[in-house]
Image: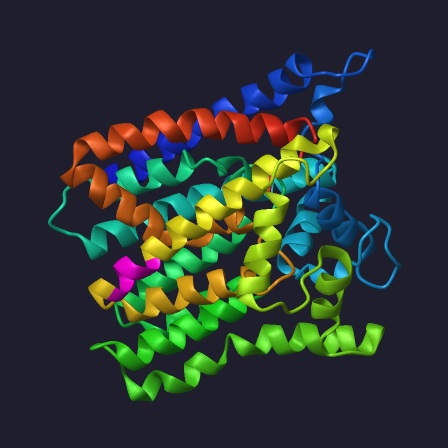
Amino acid sequence: MPTPLTREVLGWWLVTRVALFVLSVSAPLLFNRGGDYPNVWKAWLQWDVWHLKAVAEFGYNHGEPSGAPLAAFFPGFPLLVRLVSYTGIGYVAAGIVVSAVASAVAGVYLARLAQYEFPELKGIGPNAAMIWYGAPVGVFLAAGYTEALFCAFAFPAWLAARQGRWARAAVFVALASTVRVSGIFLIFALLVEFVTSKKRDWLSLPWLALPAVPVLGFMAYLKQIHGSWFAWQDAQEKGWAREFTWPWISLVHTFEAASKGHFPADRSDWTWMFRAELVTLFVGLILLAWLFWRRSWGEAAWVAATIGAFCTSFWIYSLTRATLLMWPLWIGLAVLARRRPWIGRLYLAVAIPLAAIWAAAFFTGRWSG
């Protein structure tokens, strides 16, 4: 039988999934700029969904069927999408199914992790999950993106690490490392957590090498078909301007992109999203300071590595979406909301409208991070 915590989390999961479904149907109708009646069922096929669908359908050695180098995407999510698509529901629907199941699992483990970290705050777990599901960029937990699946592995991995169950943690981090390049940062964070933990067991140290296996395996595969161990990084640079840039230069580029008039008038959504990236960076730095103050070294390593990766590209973008992976942020907000209820109410007053705006932007094909 599901525990009360699990039932409450799944209740929030269901409510937010229904809300996003309503937006996916209504947004293309309300914001239709063309003369033809829009196909609202194609609202989920946007941006990276095209590329992940192409990987699931064609693999990595069929050129660029989606118009971008596919080596940038790790194989875990597309592989699951391909398996689910054998039911006959199609690749886009399969991606939605994978994300739906993964977001439910991740929400439950986020709640368990929050309750483990703050046992004195009764009910903090479901609150953290609710805040996470209601995040401004929560639409990416429902669409055929990699965030939900990564979190479904990363959250139980970190709970296991905090409990001193290092073998279990290593297995989950290895699974997360098949989904996103962020797995490399999670490997680093796990090593920091092990070294600084009072529950470290040196006999378990060899297990921490396991997460490197899928990463090296993917790199070796790309070497065979593209001739480079770092073909995934080359693809990131070619398709998304992820070449190394000094953080202060990246910040200048981002401020320029967030300035009015930098992009054509019909791409005002780009300007708006770059402004959101700057706000997210500020929030991330506050979160990092809080983690250092708490001496949460493993979590600090995770957040610092994630922010650092985004701040060393040509410009900072998709950091908003990456906040979904930062479990300390959602747990921290839940703690604040419990200790200062007005902060919780303020968060919901801001987050819910933003979540609707972000979802509407995504479902109508506007840039949404």
State the image quarter where residue 164 is shown.
Answer: bottom left
**Side (left or right) of 140 relative to 70:** left
- Percent of width and height locating residue 95: 64, 42
**Side (left or right) of 321 relative to 134:** right
Q: Residue at x 55, y 60 (%)?
A: 310
Quadrant, the C terminus: top right
Task: Depth check: give the residue in front, 363 or 214.
Answer: 363
**Side (left or right) of 44 relative to 298:** right
Give the image's coloring scheme: rainbow
Task: Depth check: give the residue in front, 49 or 278.
Answer: 278
Up-down: is 13 above or below 217?
above
Residue 47 visible within the image: yes
Q: Residue at x 80, y 59 (%)?
A: 69
Task: Depth check: give the residue in front, 152 or 255.
Answer: 255
Q: Residue at x 57, y 65 (%)?
A: 312
The range drawn in magenta is: 288-292
State the image quarter where residue 74 is shown.
Answer: bottom right
Up-down: is 208 above or below 265?
below
Up-down: is 146 above or below 358?
below
Residue 15 visible within the image: no
**Side (left or right) of 299 relative to 121:** right
- Percent of width and height locating residue 261: 68, 36
- Percent of width and height locating residue 166: 35, 74
Q: Residue at x 51, y 55 (%)?
A: 150
Q: Name, please, the residue furthest toward the left.
A: 120
Quadrant, the N terminus: top left
Is the stretch drawn in magenta largely helix, strand or loop? helix
Task: Depth check: give the residue in front, 133 or 336.
Answer: 336
State the image quarter where residue 198 is shown.
Answer: bottom left
Residue 121 counted in the magenta span = no
- Percent of width and height locating residue 68: 80, 53
